[in-house]
Image: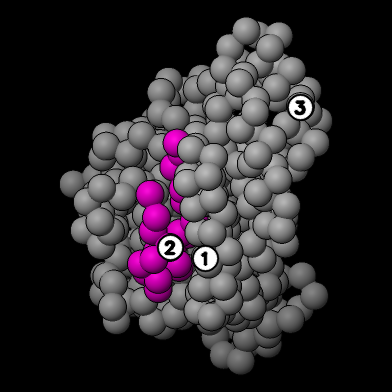
Amino acid sequence: MFNIKTVKQSIFFKQNWIELDKSAFHFNLKKVRNYIAQDTKIMLVIKSNAYGHGCVEFAKEANKSGISQLAVSSLEEGIKLRESGVKSNILLLDTIFPFENFQVAIAHSLTPTISSIAQLPILEHLAIRLNKRINFHLKIDTGMGRIGISSNIAKIILQKISKMSCVNMVGLYTHFAVADTDPSFTQLQLNIFTQIVRFARVYLNFKFTAHSANSAALLKNKYTHLDMVRFGLLAYGLPPFKNLDKIFKLKPVLTWKTLITFLKKVPAGFSISYGRTFVTNKMSTIATIPVGYSDGYNRILSNKGHVLVHGKYCPIIGRITMTETMIDVTDVKNVNLFDEVVLIGYQNKSQIKVEDLASLQNTINYEVICSIAEHIPRIVI
């Protein structure tokens, strides 16, 4: 049995931590593997600190599971992984800017994405100067409207690349805008992309890995799988669309916990926190927990959200402050100082889902987990 108190005392002091279940992570990866074709590769997306879970830890766990392709969003993330001893292939999804930073990527064996025509000669000149052939992935914008070579000039760009001997296109990819909600537009994007893939392979004789499927597309349209699927959310046990659990069971990896650090009994008519937005209507027991919006616990949850204490849902009362939050534990029997509090996850038979917080905040589960501050200790169990 994992003893959080022992670990907590030896590693960190603030009574606010995240537990990460690596067995759940491997369970989710196995579910995806069983869903896709045997020869389809997997690229695990671990950008934004593995969606708040911890990029180094899960890069290493992914490697243990046989995944050798990772994707991050920034040079900083890629360098952090290299300095932590991660040997996997790492794709930089975002645009490298300024262009001089291509040499930083190459120095750390990170594979850049080419998403504009202006980047190509820079990469080619760098390859000539270093006297080495540089690998890259080319991104095509088929309807996302973020970054990528416009699909209507993609064939022209590919023809230019075919004449460059110092650079090597090892990947060709796109990204879906509404894979979770609009199958027609997703199919339109896929049709555009597969035509470009076919042109590159048949007419230009390119050898590369084609990839397009994010978590939602992976489950909703098997034709998006191509040579490789590229997903993140599913690995961490979070649904990319509603009602997923009816067709595809996952295990959440992340649990966010804290402890009660202050208890007080207050009379009726007693106000709580800034702005006096909550006033008790009876004699109440109020607990303070050491988590606030500086930790990524959104202030919007003030007077809306709940936490778990002894398996019971306890309301957040008053405004969430920078480092502390107050909860009403009046109805919890035998509540004590230092009792465990769950912000996200299970306690006894009760659960608070990431999606519950997302709904209250009028946002998506991605934002909730990515907003958890990096200073919160992550403990892999």
Under tag 1, what secondary structure? helix
Contact between marks 1 and 2 (CB within 8 A): the answer is: yes
Residue 134, can we see it? yes
Instruction: Say which quarter of the image contains residue 220.
Output: bottom left
Q: Is 372 in front, or is 251?
A: 251
Residue lying furthest left in this view?
1
Residue at the (53%, 80%) spot, across then down: 184
N-terminal-most mark, 1 or 2: 1
N-terminal-most mark, 3 or 2: 3
The question of residue 223 being in magenta is answered with: yes
Residue at the (47%, 46%) spot, across then down: 202
**What colouring does the structure picture have?**
one colour
Provide residue 145's location: percent of width, then percent of height.
Answer: 72, 62
Under mark 1, the amino acid is Leu
Instruction: Say which quarter of the image contains residue 122.
Output: top right
Q: Which residue is mark 2?
A: 224
Provide residue 20's location: percent of width, then percent of height.
Answer: 36, 48
The relative height of residue 245 versus residue 36 in the rendered view (above or below) is below
Under mark 2, the amino acid is Thr
Provide residue 174's location: percent of width, then percent of height.
Answer: 57, 55
* Magenta segment: 207-227
Residue at the (29%, 81%) spot, across then down: 246
Q: Which residue is mark 1?
A: 190
Bin the neighbour count of mark 2 within 10 Å (Cα to Cα): few under 14, some 14-19, many 20 and up: many
Q: Which residue is mark 3?
A: 121
Under tag 2, what secondary structure? helix
Under tag 3, what secondary structure? helix
